[in-house]
């Protein structure tokens, strides 16, 4: 997500998108098959927004800085909803703030 477009070869980007697409498909299938799949959507939406905002908080740690990701928290709380939530948050970061490139998500 920190790599600009054009740095990675197309084969790496395509393989990454294929793997991510497969994992998202699996997550959405598990969500669809679960009982009360609509019940967790507000929680997933709220935590997606928290992930989006928290990733902009930078903590200086010499010689660089780190930023909060919250992906472990999202995975623990949301389960199968976590992967689509993280992908949505990263997509909006790339589109709205050019935080990395679209080909390297």
Image (tube, rainbow, N blue to C red):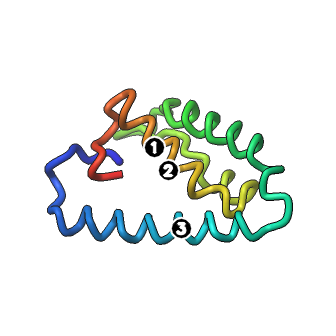
Tags 2 and 1 in contact by the CB under 8 Å rule? yes
**Tag 3's secondary structure?**
helix
- For residue 89, above or below residue 8: above
Residue 50 image position (x, y, % from top left): 64, 35
Spatial separation of the CA atoms under disc 2 and disc 1:
5 Å
Q: Are there few (<14), some (14-19), or many (20+) residues within 10 Å of tag 1?
A: many
Q: What label does residue 25 carry, if any?
A: 3
Tags 3 and 2 in contact by the CB under 8 Å rule? no
Position of 84 with respect to 103 (left or right) is: right
Q: What label does residue 90 carry, if any?
A: 1
Residue 90 image position (x, y, % from top left): 45, 43
**To which quarter of the image does residue 16 belong?**
bottom left
Spatial separation of the CA atoms under disc 3 and disc 1:
17 Å
Residue 52 image position (x, y, % from top left): 55, 35
Tags 3 and 1 in contact by the CB under 8 Å rule? no
| 105 or 53, nearer to the observer | 105
Spatial separation of the CA atoms under disc 3 and disc 2:
12 Å
**Tag 2's secondary structure?**
helix
| 92 or 2, nearer to the observer | 92
Q: What residue is rendered at 74% in x and 46% in y?
A: 41
Residue topped by disc 2: 87
Which of disc 2 and disc 3 is earlier in sequence? 3
**Tag 1's secondary structure?**
helix
Position of 50 with respect to 19 (left or right) is: right
Q: What residue is rendered at 62% in x and 63% in y?
A: 28
Q: What residue is rendered at 40% in x and 71% in y?
A: 19
Q: Are there few (<14), some (14-19), or many (20+) residues within 10 Å of tag 2?
A: some
Q: Are there few (<14), some (14-19), or many (20+) residues within 10 Å of tag 3?
A: few
């Amino acid at each position: 997500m920190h790599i600009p477009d054009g740095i990675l070869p197309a084969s790496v980007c395509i393989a990454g998108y294929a793997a991510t697409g497969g994992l998202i498909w699996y997550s959405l299938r598990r969500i669809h098959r679960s009982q009360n799949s609509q019940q967790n959507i507000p929680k997933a939406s709220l935590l997606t927004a928290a992930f989006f905002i928290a990733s902009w908080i930078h903590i200086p740690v010499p010689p660089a800085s780190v930023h909060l990701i919250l992906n472990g928290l999202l995975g623990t709380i949301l389960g199968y909803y976590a992967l689509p939530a993280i992908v949505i948050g990263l997509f909006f970061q790339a589109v709205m703030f050019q935080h990395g490139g679209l080909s390297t998500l």
